Amino acid sequence: MNGALLEQMQKDARTIVKTDFNTTVEITDKNGKTESIEGLATLHHSTFDPEAGGTVSGRNAHICVSIKDLEEAGFNLYENTKADYINMKGWKVSFQFGNKTWQFLCEDVRPSQTFGLIVMYNLGALK
C-alpha cells in the first residue's frame, strides 16, 4: 500500500497532465482499439538524430499520460509482454496543434509507477 503523500503526488501528477497542460491525444493500440485521453503532448522540430549522430530534418513528439487513465480506458498495457513490462511499441497516437492533426507511431515508453505516468517517446511520423 502506498503512503498518503505518495498517493497525493500521483493524484497531483495526473491532474497536471490531464488539466493543467492538457491536449486531447487519440491513442490506438495494435488491436485497433482507439480512445481519447487527456495528456501532455510536445511537438519538436528535430535537427539531430540521437541514434546515428547525424543531422536530420523532421518532427518528433513526446506524449505523457496517466497510466490509470489508459487502464480505465480499457487498454491492456501488459499484453504480449514480460510480467510488469509495459509495451506500447507500434501504437498510434495523434493530437491537434493549431489546425493540423499530427500522427505518430510509438517506438518506446518510459513508465513511472512512482508518479503513475507514462511517457511515449521516440514517436516517429506515420508514413
Image (tube, rainbow, N blue to C red):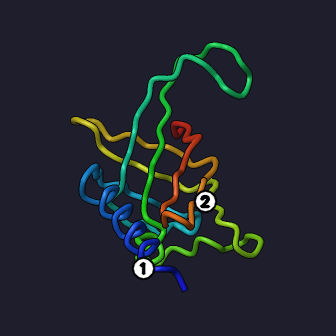
- On the image, the x and y values in percent for residue 119 come to 52, 52
Which residue is the extreme one toward the top? 55
How many neighbours does mark 1 have within 10 angstroms: few (below 14), some (14-19), or many (20 or more)?
Answer: few
How many neighbours does mark 2 have within 10 angstroms: few (below 14), some (14-19), or many (20 or more)?
Answer: many
Indicate whether 92 appears above or below 103. Answer: below
Callout count: 2
Q: Locate residue 99: give its quadrant.
A: top left
Tell me the SS state at disc 1.
helix
Query: Alpha-carbon distance for marks 2 and 1?
Result: 30 Å
Q: What residue did someone put label 1 on?
A: 4
Left or right placement of residue 86 versus residue 58 in this view? right
What residue is rendered at 59% in x and 63% in y?
30
Residue type beneath disc 2: Met
The earlier-in-sequence mark between 2 and 1 is 1
Tell me the SS state at disc 2.
loop
Which residue is the extreme one toward the right? 82
Q: Nearer the viewer, residue 57 or 126?
A: 57
What residue is rendered at 55% in x and 86% in y?
1
Residue type beneath disc 1: Ala
Q: Nearer the viewer, residue 16 or 80?
A: 16
Marks 2/1 in contact by CB < 8 Å: the verdict is no
Indicate whether 90 appears above or below 70. Answer: above
- On the image, the x and y values in percent for residue 18 come to 30, 60
Q: Which mark is residue 107?
A: none
What residue is rendered at 49% in x and 43% in y?
104
Indicate whether 103 appears above or below 81. Answer: above
Q: What residue did someone put label 2 on?
A: 88
What residue is rendered at 70% in x and 67% in y?
85
